[in-house]
Amino acid sequence: MNEIASFIIAKYNYWIYIVLMMIGLYAMIVKNNLVKKIIGMNIFQTAIILFYVSIGTKRGATIPIIYHGHGDGSHAVHATDYINPLPHVLMLTAIVVSVATLGVALAIALKVYRRYNTLEEDEIFTQIRRK
Amino acid sequence: MEMIESIKPLLAVLISVVVVVPLIIISRRPNTREAWTFVAAVGKFILVASMLPVILDGSEITCTVASVLPGLDIAFRVDAFGMLFALVSSSLWIVTSVYSIGYMRGLDEHSQARYFSFFALSLSATIGVAFSANLLTLYLFYEMLSFATYPLVTHHQDIEARRSGRKYLLYIVGSSIALVLPAMIITWQLTGTLTFSPAGILGGQASPAVVTMLLFFFLYGFAKAGLMPFHSWLPAAMVAPTPVSALLHAVAVVKVGVFCILRVLTGVFGIKLLADLNLGTVVAVLASITIITSSLIAMSQDGLKRRLAFSTISQLSYIILGAAILSPKSMTGGMVHIAMHAFGKITLFFCAGAIFVATGKKYISEMAGIGKQMPITMTAFFIGALSVIGLPPCGGIISKWNIAVGTLETHQAGFLVVLLVSSILNAAYFLPIVYKAFFCGPEETLFPDKIKEAPLWCVVPLVVTAVLSILMFIFPQPFLTLAKLSVGTLFINP
Amino acid sequence: MTQHLPAIIIVVPLLSALLVAVFGWIKKTICFVIALPAMGIVFLSSIVLFYKVITENQPIIYFLGGWSPPVGIAYNIDHLSSLVLVLISGVTLAHLIATRQTVIEEFTNKVSAFYTLYILFVTGLMGIVATGDAFNLYVLLEIASITGYAMIGMNSGRAYLACFNYIIIGTIGACLYLLGVGYIYLVTGSLNMLDIASILPGLVDSKVVPAAFIICMVGLMVKMGLFPLHGWLPNAYTYAPSSVSTLMAPLTTKVMIYVMVRVALYVFTPVLSFSVIKPGNGFTWIAVAAIIMGSLMALSQQNIKKMLSYIVIAEVGYMVGGLWLGNRMGITGAILHIVNDAVMTLCIFLAVVSFSSYKKRDKLSDFQGAFKEMPVTAAVFCVAAISIIGVPPTCGFFSKWYLISGGLAAGHYAFVAALLFSSLINMVLFFRIIEIAYFEPFSDHHGKKHHVKIAEASPGLLIPLIIVACMLIILGLYTDELVTHVISHAIPAEIV
């Protein structure tokens, strides 16, 4: 029991991202409303972003910026002292991507609304079938 | 054996493809258009015939066109057997071209430019099959022939044509994709080559079970040969205009089927392998069943073309039977039968077409007394029938005689019985037609006692092929020589 | 100059997209005038790159902006990617010219927006193929996807909903790929594909690597529309504007399969992909299901574009199956089929567009009389159909040849049977259309032929169409060259 608990707690960051991802996936698949689907999609993307960010951390490390870096060179930088910046940088790009996707998705949802006057998927389907 | 590099086989194949272009361009002027077809047909025949002396000398002509897969080329090789087949189809194309002109104009058919274009394409494919050096090239032209003949079979573009076309493609293309293609690839994987060799390529490369499986794949995959139960496309294809039935469904297409089977039996499996595994007998039994069954079915057919179609199915199996007996004599007979049957059967089809053009009659029951109106046509029909039955003085006897001698040589007299029974059946379904046409009382006859033949364009070709059928009895060379040459290379080590 | 070609194939279209966006506001017709030379340059550069890689027989590695990995992004042009680059740029060029008229008709007021998206889409695809960085690949993947979503959404009607589903599912796919890359990064600390490939074989015992592998692959399978993850594809291609679906159908799925090949062979390396993780058998069975289900579902369609979309799904099965057979024959077949299928699909989709030039032809029954009116398009359609059925000497036969050989060599007879089954179904599918177009409307064959006026598509569409159809046969005849000089080098030597 103890082992399982420590297993779960020690890797809490992964568990969080998995839970978030599943919430997002659930919303995308099950929800009837298109905007809710979009929200699910965003949660899904955010979960992965959080995963990336969490893997860059280190205990007791700081951001990788050198204070008073100019000068005598006495500030030899140890890798243990700063967190890995690369995943964070990558996630900046991923955020941009997710925003772009969100934008397109919302635009399409808007077009759907203008055409069918509803955002509920089942109602749209009945309209399509009726035609 | 001497090998000669030459571009001639390629030219012989391409000449009728090339002619399609001017055919389409000048499609508005029928006379020039048909002149082109004629030029192509004669040109093709001359090209093929010009290779004959070299082949008769015992040499072979090769030509590699392109290397499409590593170690696998599109290549031509003209040997005696291929030559035999090419000679038959290219010479009969000339006759059929003349006949087509008479038939198509006589009936005022539509889309004649399309008709002549695809006819030319089909002949290209046929010659391609005849000259193929390997299985891949063979397959390529086999499929090309299937697709090129589709618009010809369905020329009338009505509901019946559509139904028949569907059946035609399903049987022919379906079986070649489902059976020949995998068999070919398996062969390639086992042996690393697909080039036909007189000794076969599969010998010692595969287990008996695999060899047997491959044999069945090839045998039924080449459905153009009409081996039962893959035969029913042929009667269906009779909706085509008669020249198509005549050249393609008595000569080119169906003979391509048996040619492929013979090529595969001799060039891929090899006589020795077939004999060792007793597979020749298996094939012979299958062929015998087809011979007898389809002869019986033919007797019950009232449509003249349908009866001819079932007769073709049984005659095709003669050729396979001849090869499967695995004796030099019967193999020679089988190969020569390609030629003999071609001349006889095309005469019969021409007659059927001529009757249709002149009187509009399609059914045998409506043809009582027709000999009074069309004596030339019906005489030709009689000669053609004699040839197909295998009676002198027509060519058919030569091939059947050889096959029969082969069965005795190899002590397989059972197949001799098959031959005799089927000959009797042949006589039983052909001769009554002729008898009724000429010798029926005045109360029975359905035609006025006044000679009214089909147009000259139709009559001349059928007279020519009828005369040729007789000449083949008197001068069976060069076909017999070619067949013997070819068989000679196959049975070097019996 | 030539050493910067890997950058040119990305930068030139990127800048021209900007130019199109700007000048398109001023004058609509100028969009095509800018796009054409841009795509021409891309095509020529790709060919030069291809030629260089072949003649020098070694990959070109280009550091974007001079930054070397692990800091910078490397572009890695090897035999495989240069081949696909030529393919993409060639297909795009032909498509661009062919659909000029269609675009004007379909996007009257939005021509400049369309061309901007169009060029960005192609840039994304080129980037996906050229890049040697796993994360950069994700970004470019999303660039191609987002522009693709937007282009599909430019049609009205059911396109919106189809597009919305595509967005949702496509995002799941891309995110899964990103997640997989995250796991790879976790264990290797690198994003450069060459680095990863040198580190991963040392991590054979790691449990993370198989997880990363499976997540990546599932993501890609969603993106390529592999059955049963294909849900988005048929509707998206059917309801998209025809000038969009004609581009996306040949390219998107094929590029995704390229990515799968790249990730399997050059990121996870053959050792991991085929010996340690061994998903091959399972994946091939999925492919078998894809081929059979794709063919069967195609059979039940009445809409031509939908039918073709299901054929695309079956073809995806061909390539995935071929790859995961894990032998040289199968992988050769898969890569060859990427090329052949792209050209085939382009040809058949363009032929359908051409058929619709004067009269809208969506349903199969709309094709009545089409062959009489458009004989040239009919001929092209038949050539493409024959190639998809897989008849020599068209290219479709030769890739099928390799795939079947691979299946036999691996002893995976179900895959072989599925391929043959699909060929037969394709025959039925296409001859059903050919029958309608050729026979109907029925008429009396002896009666006076009522003259049908020949109304062919414009030469602008017809000429590229004929060229593409000729390519089908040329590619077929040059299979030997393609395999020995390009594809055999593209497959790692340890695969036999």
Image: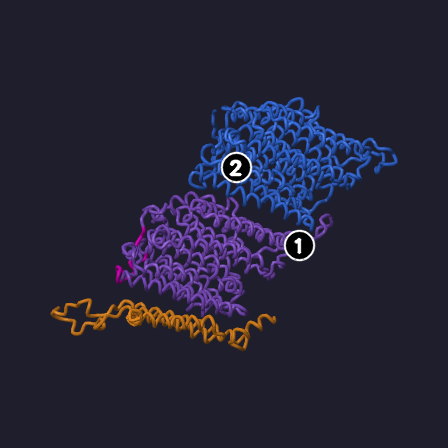
Chain colours: A orange, B blue, C purple
Horizontal placement of B49 versus B101: left or right? left
Horizontal placement of A38 versus B438: left or right? left
**Badge 1 density bin: few <14, some 14–19, many ≥20, Cα 10 Å:** many
- Closest to the camera, between mark 2 and mark 1, is 2
Q: Position of residue A128 (x, y in %)?
A: 57, 71
- Residue picked out by circle 1: C440
Quarter of the image for residue B310 reads top right
State if disc 1 and disc 2 touch (CB < 8 Å).
no
Horizontal placement of C364 versus C393: left or right? right
Q: Position of residue C31 (x, y in %)?
A: 45, 64
Q: Amino acid at mark 1?
A: Glu
Magenta region: C59-75
- Residue picked out by circle 2: B212
> Marks 2 and 1, how far apart in space?
44 Å
Q: Position of residue A87 (x, y in %)?
A: 29, 67
A76 or C207, which lies in front?
C207
Q: Chain of mark 1?
A: C
Q: Amino acid at mark 2?
A: Thr
